[in-house]
Amino acid sequence: MSFPALHIGDLIARTPIVQGGMGVGISLSRLASAVANEGGIGVIAGAMVGMREPDVASNPIEANVRALRREIEKARAATTGIIGVNIMVALTTFAEMVKASIESHADVIFSGAGLPMDLPKIFQETCEAKKEEFRTKLVPIVSSGRAATLIAKKWMSRTGLLPDAFVLEGPKAGGHLGFAEEHIFDENFALEKLVSGVTDAAKALEDKAGRAIPVITGGGVFSGADIAKMLSLGASGVQMATRFVATEECDADIRFKEAYVNAKEEDVTIIHSPVGMPGRALDNDFIRAAREGRKKPFKCVFHCIKTCDPSTTPYCISSALINAMKGNLDKGFVFCGSNVGRVKGIVSVHELVETLRREYEEYMNGAKAQPAAV
């Protein structure tokens, strides 16, 4: 039994895997196009996508928008598959990045790290300004059915639009987490227990939408068996990020990837991010120095996150993540998912997807072979 396709409106991903957006240079056009070529949805992350632009400090909006347009164009040249963009609500460049993604004909915009209430308004304004009916799908990233319902209600009342899908991101995800710190390890907030709340919310909206609204689940999805379990709970697809870091096509430095391969379960820690959210990362001297007060407030040059206050924040998260992406791990840190300790080597995206497919099929064939309960 092979992978079922993931349908988001008229988009059809023959592999029901969304490669999670990993900001500050981890998932750019090379990784995204490789995933799209395997039938999944490849995702370019918008956060500090312009970090290599010479004017990123003096002209951050134009630098990041320019770089994002170029990454989408490069991905398009490398694949005929589905290319998405991940744009954090917390970005100071949010509106400009959304507009640029739509105008560049990104297939999907995934948006979290806040509630993307203005996403459909920007979409409509872009269509009107360009006098073009863009087909970009709008997909909020949520942590509960309540958030999904709230977003849909606001979108409908303000614009008449509804989400094309939802991504439910659970507390085992990497990077910034949409949960209070006390809920991260609370079994009541486990991804498996949250799925029905979001699928029920989506189903309640489908009559109004006149179409299916699929739910994609992420955060701790590691194997083909995990994919099968998520689909059995009502998800239409999964989002995976950690697995795609340890691939040849990932846009990060080899030392970043090797940090994943060498990681052990006990190396994973929760940090208090300057963004104002908890985050999951690999513990190191940089993180310990921040915890111990050995980092001091800094002069902000990027102005990238709305919620970051340089006068009280002990370090620049963009600088830390840029250093890590370049392999300078002593001057930054590595975001990761909870299962990073299970990564054993660096493979190609093709090898990874084929492994997941085989594991999925073995799990499904094993489930079919089980005798029926009496």
Image: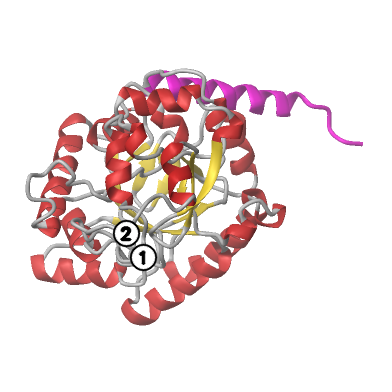
At horizontal 32% and vertical 29% (from top left) the residue drawn is: 250
At horizontal 55% and vertical 43% (from top left) the residue drawn is: 269
Q: Is residue 114 above or below residue 20?
A: below
Q: Which residue, given by chain and number where applicable, does mark 1 sit on?
A: 312
**Total numbered badges shown on the rendered structure:** 2
Per the image, is 341 magenta? no
Mark 1 element type: loop
Q: Are marks 1 and 2 in contact (CB under 8 Å)?
A: yes
x, y percent for residue 101: 20, 54
Mark 2 is on which residue type? Pro
Give the mark nearer the N terminus: 1 vs 2: 2
Mark 1 vs mark 2, CA separation in Å: 6 Å
Apparent side of residue 92 relative to residue 58 in the rendered image (left or right): right
What is the span of residues highlighted in magenta in the rendered image?
349-374
Q: Is residue 236 above or below residue 329?
A: below
x, y percent for residue 347: 41, 18
x, y percent for residue 3: 51, 31
Magenta span: chief secondary structure: helix
Q: Which residue, given by chain and number where applicable, does mark 2 sit on?
A: 297
Q: Is residue 163 above or below residue 237?
A: below
Mark 1 is on which residue type? Thr
Give the label on residue 27, or none.
none
Choose between 120 and 67: the one closer to the eye. Answer: 67
Mark 2 element type: loop
Would residue 219 be seen by someone viewing this image from the given angle? no
Quarter of the image with the N terminus is: top right
